[in-house]
């Protein structure tokens, strides 16, 4: 492993200055020219910890960390004479980079299943736009244009949820240069936060969690014929060939906007399936032509081409993950529609890493050299369930 050596790191820090050095390393981590594994905690500590005059004392302090030294070592006792700011800042960027990498890897469906909406509120009412008739284009000469106003229609989003964990860099991690251990902790933190968010979003998308609240009344996301629901977007179609997707598409013909009364027009089309249906879905979406097979029961089957793939021009995006079956408890269920129109993630803040201040109590009590708190806060909300359809994939 080719670590960024103490002398080179110190040279960059001295020449560029603290802020610019941090910016350069952050950019290098972001574009992949440097990776978290290219750094050594011990060598960074030796290169970046200074006294109040700017003299590098990191190497001396590392030697003082040796428990065999009778005097011992404590940042609290050293007080303002020791500055670990540069070490903490750069270590924080490395921890964040590794954390974010695993966070994204653990939540591959998140960005496809919902639209992220930044908000400073925890739960809010979102008003609709009053419906206008389709004669809005007929504005007479010299006449006023009609106004699209806020209607009495509104949805209520749930309260946001904060998730977070703390990553510690201990004296032992620096002294024994356990860089890999700290990076694994950062990766675990990112993975836990990513999985947590993915589960919450997926639960809403598949209907395990129902939080749609319109005009003060709570509704489920999916209703089948006979459920006495205000719409029908659920059935039992088995996913087997292109006609099944066509049938799901036709469900949208029976769905209308509750305000305007106009048909629901979906834009992007996403197909969400469990792993058991992944190969079937890929085969159907990528087929170049469709064949008809008949007379099988009589023992003299015939085959003929009926044309190109009807699904080819629909721009269907295939989404799948082992998490789908884990959250739905079904290997046959599938979902189809415009998920980003149907669901939103109301985000107070994205995954963020904050470092603890120097000379805090944890340094003395637990030999913590640096401490980083990772958190994110938000909640998935059903914005308009009529933009998605759901099939159990099995009758009964």
Image (cartoon, rainbow, N blue to C red):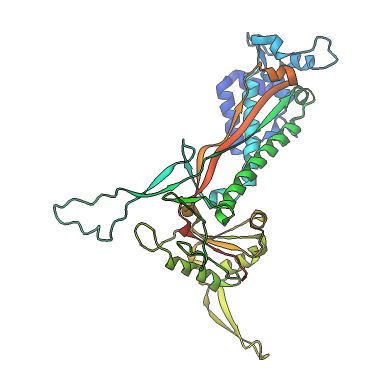
Quadrant for the N terminus in the image: top right
**Residue at image location 65% in from the left, 22% down from the top:** 87
Q: In front: 174, or 140? A: 140
Quadrant for the C terminus in the image: bottom right
Count all numbered tags in the image, as a single digit: 0
**Residue at image location 63% in from the left, 40% down from the top:** 193
Residue 98 versus residue 335 in the image, above or below:
above
**Residue at image location 41% in from the left, 61% down from the top:** 265
- From this viewpoint, is residue 203 visible? yes
- For residue 292, which quarter of the picture? bottom right
Q: In front: 348, or 94? A: 348
**Residue at image location 58% in from the left, 28% down from the top:** 24
Location of residue 183 in the rendering, given as x and y in whole percent from the top left corner: 71, 34
Location of residue 343 in the rendering, given as x and y in whole percent from the top left corner: 50, 51
- For residue 132, which quarter of the picture? bottom left
Location of residue 392 in the rendering, given as x and y in whole percent from the top left corner: 60, 65
- From this viewpoint, is residue 109 visible? no
Q: Residue furthest right?
A: 68
Q: In front: 275, or 65? A: 275
Seen in the image, is 44 located left or right of residue 143? right
Q: In front: 173, or 371? A: 371
Seen in the image, is 251 located left or right of residue 96? left
- For residue 175, which quarter of the picture? top right
Seen in the image, is 389 located left or right of residue 69? left
Residue 337 versus residue 194 in the image, above or below:
below
Location of residue 274 in the rendering, given as x and y in whole percent from the top left corner: 64, 60
């Amino acid at each position: 492993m080719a670590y960024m050596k103490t002398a080179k790191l110190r040279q960059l820090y001295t020449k560029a200055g603290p802020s610019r050095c941090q910016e350069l390393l952050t950019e290098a981590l972001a574009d992949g020219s440097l990776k978290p594994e290219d750094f050594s905690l011990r060598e960074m500590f030796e290169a970046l910890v200074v006294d109040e005059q700017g003299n590098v004392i990191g190497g001396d302090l590392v030697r003082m960390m040796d428990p065999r030294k009778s005097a011992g070592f404590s940042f609290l006792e050293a007080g303002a004479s020791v500055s670990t700011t540069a070490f903490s800042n750069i270590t924080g960027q490395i921890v964040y980079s590794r954390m974010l990498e695993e966070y994204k890897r653990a939540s591959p469906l998140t960005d496809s299943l919902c639209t992220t909406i930044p908000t400073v509120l925890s739960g809010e009412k979102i008003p609709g736009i009053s419906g206008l008739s389709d004669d809005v284009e007929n504005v007479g000469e010299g006449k006023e244009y009609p106004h699209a106003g806020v209607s009495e229609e509104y949805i209520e989003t749930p309260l946001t949820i904060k998730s977070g964990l703390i990553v510690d860099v201990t004296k032992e991690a620096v002294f024994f240069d356990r860089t890999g251990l700290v990076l694994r902790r950062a990766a675990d933190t990112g993975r836990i936060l990513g999985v947590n968010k993915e589960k919450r979003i997926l639960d809403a998308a598949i209907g395990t969690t129902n939080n749609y609240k319109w005009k003060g009344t709570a509704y489920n996301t999916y209703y089948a014929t006979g459920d006495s629901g205000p719409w029908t977007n659920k059935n039992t179609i088995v996913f087997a060939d292109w006609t099944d997707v066509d049938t799901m598409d036709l469900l949208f013909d029976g769905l209308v906007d509750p305000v305007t009364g106009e048909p629901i027009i979906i834009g992007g089309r996403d197909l969400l399936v469990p792993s058991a249906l992944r190969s079937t879905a890929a085969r159907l979406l990528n087929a170049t032509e469709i064949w008809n097979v008949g007379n099988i029961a009589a023992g003299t089957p015939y085959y003929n081409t009926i044309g190109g793939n009807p699904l080819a021009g629909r721009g269907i995006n295939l989404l799948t993950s082992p998490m789908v079956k884990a959250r739905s408890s079904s290997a046959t269920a599938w979902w189809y529609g415009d998920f980003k129109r149907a669901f939103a993630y109301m985000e107070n803040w994205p995954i963020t890493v904050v470092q603890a201040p120097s000379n805090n109590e944890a340094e003395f009590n637990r030999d913590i050299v640096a401490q980083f708190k990772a958190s994110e806060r938000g909640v998935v909300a059903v914005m308009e369930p009529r933009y998605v359809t759901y099939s159990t994939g099995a009758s009964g």
